[in-house]
Each structure stands twice: as C-alpha cells, then as structure tokens.
Image (tube, helix red, strand yellow):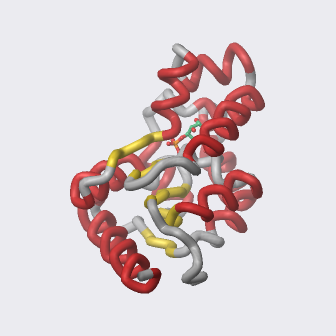
Amino acid sequence: MDSTRHIRNLTLIGFMGTGKSSVGRMAADALHFTYLDTDDVIEARAGISISELFEKHGEQVFRDWEKRLVEELTRRTKTVISTGGGLPANEANFVSLQSHSLIICLWASPEKIYQRVKGQTHRPLLNQADPVAKIRELLAAREPFYRRADVLVNTDFRSAREVATQVLHQFHMAQAVAR
Ligand code: S3P
C-alpha cells in the first residue's frame, strides 16, 4: 500500500447485496465515525427514490449525481462511506475515493448476491427477466475496479458482524502502517 496516502476515511465498495450498508453502520459505530451512504444522500437531495430517479431521468443522471457527490467526499474526515454498487466502476470516482480513504471491497458470488436481493424491488438494475444473468454481466464489467480495492473481503459465508470485524481489523492495520 502507498504509505503517502492520507487515509482519513473508510470506503466500502462492492456489488448490490454484499452488505455494505449493514457492515458500514457497524464499522462507523465501532470507530465513532460518521456513516454516509451515497444512495441515501442522493435520494435525500433529489427528493425521490433511486428507482424513481432511474425511471424518470435515466441511469446517466443518477451517475452524474454520484460523480458530484464523490467530489464532495474529498473534504470528509472520519467517515465510513458506503457506495452504490456502480459508483466505483468509474476511473475518476475510484481514484478520488482512493485519495482519502482505505477502500475495502465486499465480495460475493452471483448466486449469493441473487439469494440476498431476490424479492427486493428497490434496485432498478435488477428488475429484469433474468436477474442472475444481469448480476453476472455487471459483476464481470465491474470486477477490474472491485479488484483494485486495498482489501477484498469475501462475504459469502460470513455474517455482517464477522465481515465488520474483518473490515475494522484491516482499517486499524492500514492506519498503523500509515503512521
Ligand atoms: C447500483 C447499486 C445500488 C444503487 C443503484 C445502482 C448499481 O446501490 O446505487 O440501484 O449500479 O450497482 P447498492 O449497491 O447499495 O444496492
């Protein structure tokens, strides 16, 4: 890891259904950091849900909201940031997050992801005839970005609490190295 980086925040990336929000909240509590979920911020600012945003304005408008938010995040300190699944799959977004945070990617297999998200309707990208095929396609396209995280944690056989423990351990180690 590049020890000249200034790790002021912890960013969780990963596909939908990998537990970023649950794990992020637990990690923020333990670290006494602020918790920020990029989807929640965008929904609050846009005044509509992510599904409505996709429906009314299209995915590109949502990605523009993400981009603007990522720029603002460079000013944050002591924050656990949980990103939407597609947010880091963009070079500028990824590099920006890396400049101020340790990036931890929560990983899961397509089958596990499907088990976790099936029955949910608030994820517009998965409202498809064949959601598993869509998960595989998106995962393959995003994998190069997800793999660039500082740490990858497989969540397939771990509870959110166990994943949070791993995440906290990695964050403490990174801070010790950077000191
Ligand atoms: C998306 C993931 C969602 C949300 C939007 C698009 C994606 O967030 O940002 O529906 O592109 O993978 P979660 O990963 O928190 O579900």
Left-right relation of 120 to 71: left
Residue 115 drawn at (x, y percent): 43, 49
Quarter of the N terminus within the rendering? bottom right
Quarter holding ligand 1: top right
Using the image, determine if residue 144 lies above or below residue 45: below
Q: Nearer the viewer, residue 178 or 98?
A: 178
Q: Do we see residue 19 in this rendering?
A: no
Residue 24 drawn at (x, y percent): 36, 52
Q: Nearer the viewer, residue 170 or 178?
A: 178
Residue name at image x 23 percent, y 52 percent: 29
Residue 101 drawn at (x, y percent): 51, 63
Using the image, determine if residue 97 lies above or below residue 70: below
Residue name at image x 40 percent, y 76 percent: 175
Using the image, determine if residue 113 lies above or below residue 53: below
Left-right relation of 57 to 32: right
Q: Quadrant of residue 156?
A: bottom left
Residue name at image x 46 percent, y 42 percent: 117
Q: Quadrant of residue 54?
A: top right
Quarter of the C terminus within the rendering? bottom left
Residue name at image x 42 percent, y 42 percent: 36
How many labels, in total? 0
Q: Nearer the viewer, residue 28 or 62?
A: 28
Left-right relation of 6 to 148: left
Q: Do we see residue 26 in this rendering?
A: yes
Using the image, determine if residue 127 lies above or below residue 137: above
Residue 144 drawn at (x, y percent): 72, 67
